[in-house]
Amino acid sequence: QVQLQESGPGLVKPSETLSLTCSVSGDSINTDQYYWSWIRQTPGKGLQWLGNIYNSGSTNYNPSLAGQVRILIDTSKNQFSLRMTSMTAADTAVYHCARAVRIATKRGYFQDWGQGTLVSVSS
Amino acid sequence: SYELPQPPSVSLSPGQTARITCSGDALSNQAASWYQQRPGQAPLLVIYKDTERPSGIPERFSGSRSGTTVTLTISGVLAEDEGDYYCQSTDSLYNWVFGGGTKLTVL
């Protein structure tokens, strides 16, 4: 049974860069079957996909975030990470990492989720 | 606004059948999935590829499609089915999109 666990700061200041890591256990991250994803949920609101990464390092990002997001993968540590620059109060949210089943190139669904970590943006 | 509109809420009594719809251009030729989110918990996949149910998900959960509308049906809802339900698909530009979510209340 795969498990995903997010880690990182719970508080960042406006304009700073957020760095989160997702540690994967119970399965190898170096597989062609899955994408590795970040999704966030603002308080009391819905889900927003941030982006995916494949084991090859190829990425696919939500265009509405206009270059704010970068996702990296480290197969040697069985981890992947999220970097978000220029954080504002509007980026306060619960950030989830997830494993997505690849059903076609750049298409799939989220099979397994981490519990999520709350990130607040405040000075 | 969300690319995959969903009704904001559905309320019914235990034993009734809940039907939650999700529609949009992104669904024109791409499969949809559905997620249940209970308060304070991570989302849980309940339907994928429009109609497939993951192992461990009760049979009362089913999915269907008619054109660009997909429907999650919960037959004989239980109190434990309360929560938010989200549809998800990918659009023509490979963006992964969620519906706005539907709050299911079991009275």
Image (spheres, grey):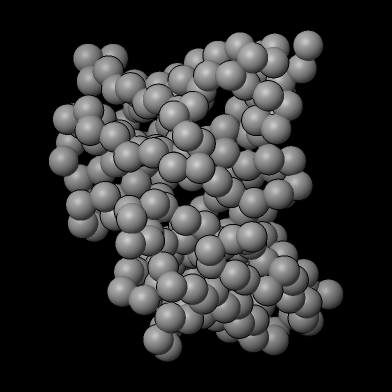
Q: Is residue B104 above or below residue A3?
A: below
Q: Locate residue A88: give its quadrant.
A: top right
Asked whether residue B59 is in view, the answer is no
Q: Is residue A62 above or below residue B73?
A: above
Residue A107 shown left or right of residue A89 in the figure: left
Residue positioned most to the right:
B107
Residue positioned most to the front:
A66
Q: Locate residue A62: give its quadrant.
A: top left
The N terminus of chain B, quarter of image: bottom right
Position in image of residue B23 (x %, y %): 51, 76
Q: Locate residue A104: give its quadrant.
A: bottom left
Position in image of residue B90 (x %, y %): 37, 59
Position in image of residue B62 (x %, y %): 47, 78
Asked whether residue A67 is in view, the answer is yes
Identify which residue is drawn at 53% across, 63% down: B3
Position in image of residue A5 (x %, y %): 48, 27
Identify which residue is drawn at 33% across, 22% down: A72
Name the foreground residue: A20 vs B29.
B29
Q: Is residue B50 above or below residue B16?
A: above
Identify which residue is drawn at 37% across, 26% down: A71
Name the foreground residue: A54 vs A61.
A61
